[in-house]
Image (spheres, rainbow, N blue to C red):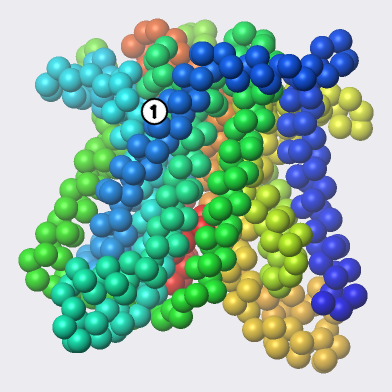
Amino acid sequence: MTRTAALRRAALLAVPVAFFALFFAYPVAAITGRGLKEDGEWRPGTAFEVLTDPGVGQVLWFTLWQAAASTALTLALALPGAYVFARLDFPGKRVLHAVVTVPFVLPTVVTGAAFLGLTGRGGLLDDLWGVRLDTGVWAILLAHVFFNYAVVVRTVGGLWAQLDPRQEEAARVLGAGRFAAFRRVTLPALGPSVAAAGLMVYLFTFTSFGVIQILGGPRYATLEVEIYRQTAQLLDLPTAAVLTLLQLATVGVLLGVHAWIVRRRESSLALVDAAHTARPPRGAGERALLGGTLAVIALLILLPLGVLVERSLSGPDGYGFAHYRALGSRSGGTFAVAPWEAVGNSLSYAAVATLIALAVGGLAAAALTRRAGRFTRGFDALLMLPLGTSAVTVGFGFLIALDEPPLDLRSSWILVPLAQALVGVPFVVRVMLPVLRAVDDRLRQAAAVLGASPWRAWREVDLPLVRRALLVSAGFAFAVSLGEFGATVFIARADRPTLPVAVARLLGRAGELNYGQAMALSTILMVTCALTLVLLESLRPARHTELVA
C-alpha cells in the first residue's frame, strides 16, 4: 500500500473510529469501570465473588443452553427454507422472501408481544385449546426461531443460490445418489456458511433481552436480562459490570470465529450468477419440501404476526379499532403524552439515526474496501461488536459518561439516535462492503489518470454502481433503529417515548386496555417494518441476498 493510499484510508477511518470510541467504547468502559471500583479504588475480588455466586451460575447456564437449543432448532427448521429460496422458483417468492425478514428487524419486545398473544394467558392457543406457554422454555425457543429464521435463510441461501448446481449433477452422473452427492459436494461448500449463520444465531440468542423479559417470567433470565435487573432494579453496578465483561468477552470470541469463517468462505469458492440457479420444483420430494417450508413459515412467522393484528382489534365488545383510538388519549396514565406520539418520535429518531449510520458506516466500508493488514480485519470485526454487547450497559453508560462538557448530552434528544445508530452501522457496512469490493479498481484508476480528484472519482464511479446498495443499507439501518430497545429504554425521555419503549411499558401494566394498546402499537411497528422490507426487496438485486454475514 502506498503512503498516499494509507493516509487516505486513515482519513476515512477517522470518523468511524472516533464515533465508536466516543459513543461505544467510552460509555461501556465508564459504566464497567465505575462498577469495579469502590471509593475510587479497584476491587480485584469483585469478579470472583460474582462468578462464584450460585444465582449467577444458573443465569449463565440458562443463557448458554437456551442459545444452543435455539440455534439447533433454528438451523433444523430454516435450512430447508434456505434450499427452497435458493434453488426453487415459485409464485410470490420475492414477497415471501421479504416477509420472512420482517421478524428480524422487529424489536424483540414486539416478538415477545406476538408470542404472548399466541401462547400466553388469554392468547390464541389458550382460547382454542387451553394451552399456555408464556413462561415456558418452548415459547422462548419458538420466539427465537421466529426472530432468527431469516438469518439462516438469507446467509446460507445467499451462498447456496450461487453454487454451481452442475457440480452436484456431475456427481450424480458418476453414480452418486442424491443424498451422497449433496453430502460430498454441496455440504462441504455450504459448511462455512452454515457455521457462520449458526454463530450469528447463537450470538443473537445469547444476548436475548426483550423476548426473555416478556416470556421468561421470574424463573428464566439471560445474562442481558440479569444485567438489566442488577442495573435498573437493584442498582448493583459491580455485579452488572462483571456480567457485562463476561458477555463482552464471549461475544468477542464468537465474532472472531465468525470473521475467520467468513474469510474462509470468501476465498475458497467459485460462484455463479444466482439468477440462473432457481427452477420450478421437480418431483414429489421437492414439492413436499416446498410445502413443508410454506407450512413452517405460515405457523412460525405469519401466525404470530397475524395474532398481533387480531389481538389489537379484539376488545370486550368484539372486534374494532377501540385500542387504536385509545392511543390518542392520555387517560391511562402510563405516559406523560398520548401513546400515539411514540409513532412520530420513533420515525424522527430512526431517520436521524439512519443518516448517522450511513455517514459512519459508509466511511468505514470505503476504508475497508481494499483488504489489508490485521488492523483493518480487526476493525471490520469490531464494527459488529455493538450487535452483541449489552445494550443495557450501553444505554446506562450513556447516562453515566455523557454528562459533562463537551459531551453533556444527557438532556439532548440526539442521545437516542446515537444509540440507535450504533446498531445500524454494522448493517450499513455489511451491505455496502461486498458491493464496493466488487467495483473494478481500474475504473477508479482511469478516473484518476484523467485528472479526477478522489471525491469526484467516488461520486462519478463508485456512487452510480453502489446507489442501490446504499438505499438497501439505509432501509436496514432505519428498520433496526426503529426497533432498538435495550439502550433506548434507559435514555428515552418520558415525554418522548419510542415505539418499543411504549410497548414494553404498556405490557408491564395490568389491564385489558394497556394490553390492547401494546398490541396496537406493535402492529403499527410491524406494518412499518414490513413496508420497509418489501421496498428493500424491490430494490435488492437478485444476487444480493446475504443479511449480516
Mark 1 crowdedness (10 Å alpha carbons): few <14, some 14-19, many ≥20? many
Q: Please tell me in which quadrant of the rendered image residue 515 appears.
A: top left
Asked if residue 246 lies left or right of residue 534, the reply is right
> Is 19 located above or below residue 263 in the figure?
above
Q: Residue at x 13, y 22 (%)?
A: 128
Q: Looking at the picture, tell me which residue is in the foreground, 410 or 166.
A: 166
In what quadrant of the picture does the N terminus appear?
bottom right
Q: Please tell me in which quadrant of the rendered image residue 380 appears.
A: bottom right
Give the image location of residue 299, x and y in percent: 21, 41
Residue occupied by mark 1: 112
Q: Residue at x 22, y 47 (%)?
A: 296
Q: Looking at the picture, tell me which residue is in the foreground, 311 or 405.
A: 405
Give the image location of residue 272, x and y in percent: 41, 81
**Kind of residue sitting beneath label 1:** Gly
Q: Looking at the picture, tell me which residue is in the foreground, 200 or 128.
A: 200
Q: Residue at x 86, y 78 (%)?
A: 2
Asked if residue 409 lies left or right of residue 388, the reply is right
Q: Please tell me in which quadrant of the rendered image residue 124 appears.
A: top left
> Is 190 located above or below residue 102 in the figure?
below
Q: Residue furthest left?
A: 284
What number of labels is visible? 1
Give the image location of residue 265, x and y in percent: 50, 68
Q: Is residue 287 something that shows in the picture?
A: yes
> Is 499 located above or below residue 54 in the figure?
below
Asked which secondary structure carries label 1, the reply is helix
Give the image location of residue 94, x and y in percent: 33, 62
Asked if residue 549 lies left or right of residue 234, the reply is left
Q: Residue at x 12, y 59 (%)?
A: 288
